[in-house]
Image (tube, rainbow, N blue to C red):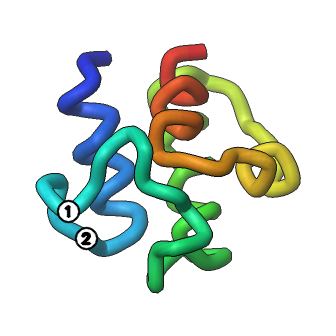
Amino acid sequence: MSNEEKMEYIAESVEMEVDELTQDTVLNDLENWDSVAVLSIIAVINEKFDRYPKAEEILTYKTVGDLMNALSE
């Protein structure tokens, strides 16, 4: 999965445009970083990598870059 694809999934999960995010964007600063966004990220990881991370794991991530790394594992 390319970085562009990862950013698209993350942007979709937080209901934002890709160009509004960078790898350094702090997740807690995003208005739409909530339980629905976390569930959306979990669904992407499950669908694309056949693993099911816990919400607690996702909530430890601080930046969009951290999420992008999770989409690589």
Q: Residue at x 38, y 39 (%)?
A: 23
Question: 10 Å neighbourhood of mark 1: few (<14), some, or many (≥20)?
Answer: few
Q: Which residue does the numbered mark 1 point to in the structure image?
A: 20
Q: Quadrant of the N terminus?
A: top left
Left or right, residue 41 beside residue 20:
right
Q: Position of residue 7 (x, y in %)?
A: 29, 41
Q: Quadrant of the C terminus?
A: top right
Q: Nearer the viewer, mark 1 or mark 2?
A: 1
Q: Amino acid at mark 2?
A: Met
Q: Residue at x 20, y 62 (%)?
A: 20
Q: Nearer the viewer, residue 53 or 60?
A: 60
Q: Nearer the viewer, residue 25 or 36?
A: 25
Q: Nearer the viewer, residue 60 or 57?
A: 60
Q: Position of residue 45 (x, y in %)?
A: 55, 35
What is the quadrant of residue 25 in the picture? bottom left
Q: Are marks 1 and 2 in contact (CB under 8 Å)?
A: yes
Q: Residue at x 28, y 55 (%)?
A: 21
What is the quadrant of residue 3 in the picture? top left
Instruction: Please say if 32 is above or below 26.
Output: below
Left or right, residue 44 beside residue 3:
right
Provide the secondary structure element on which disc 1 rests: helix
Q: Which residue does the numbered mark 2 point to in the structure image?
A: 16
Left or right, residue 23 beside residue 39:
left
